[in-house]
Image (spheres, rainbow, N blue to C red):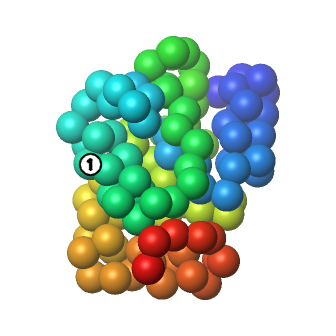
Amino acid sequence: MDDSTKNLIQNHIDTNEVCLFMKGTPDAPQCGFSMAVSNMLKILEVNYKGINVLESQPLREGIKEFSDWPTIPQVYIKGEFVGGCDIVKEMYENGELKKVLEDKQINYKK
């Protein structure tokens, strides 16, 4: 991964409390897994930034290398990698996602 891609990814993570690297946009997800994670964040009314990895092949490949995680979507909360669709879904269902949001002082619908 080149430095510009790495810096772009780091900048998104640093400037957004909740960052979702996804295929498509929050309003128009282009894969079911991205849609699922986006919907969970919308249900919780979390203010998050969706980054469309389909707009840039270097970004699409770079985020996988950056996080050492092979799939998209990927969620970061306050700079910390949380996981992909399966992990976020499990955390959402067992209440752990709300706890992470509370611990990191992120506003959401309680």
Would residue 93 be visible to someone looking at this image?
Answer: yes
Crowding around mark 1 (Cα neighbors within 10 Å: few <14, some 14 to 19, many 20+) is some
Would residue 87 be visible to someone looking at this image?
Answer: no
- Residue at 49% across, 26% down: 53
Question: Percent position (x, y) of residue 76?
Answer: 56, 56
Q: Is residue 100 above or below residue 83?
A: below
Query: Which residue is at the front of the view, 83 or 109?
Result: 109
Q: Is residue 64 above or below residue 24?
A: below
Question: Percent position (x, y) of residue 93?
Answer: 24, 75
Q: Quadrant of the N terminus?
A: top right
* Number of numbered labels in the structure image: 1
Q: Which residue type does callout 1 highlight?
A: Ala
Q: Quadrant of the C terminus?
A: bottom left
Residue 8, image quadrant? top right
Question: Percent position (x, y) of residue 66?
Answer: 60, 43
- Residue at 50% across, 45% down: 20
Side of 87 relative to 1 (left or right): left
Residue 81, image quadrant? bottom right
Q: Is residue 41 above or below residue 50?
A: below
Disc 1: which residue: 36
- Residue at 76% across, 50% down: 14
Mark 1: secondary structure:
helix
Side of 81 relative to 41 (left or right): right
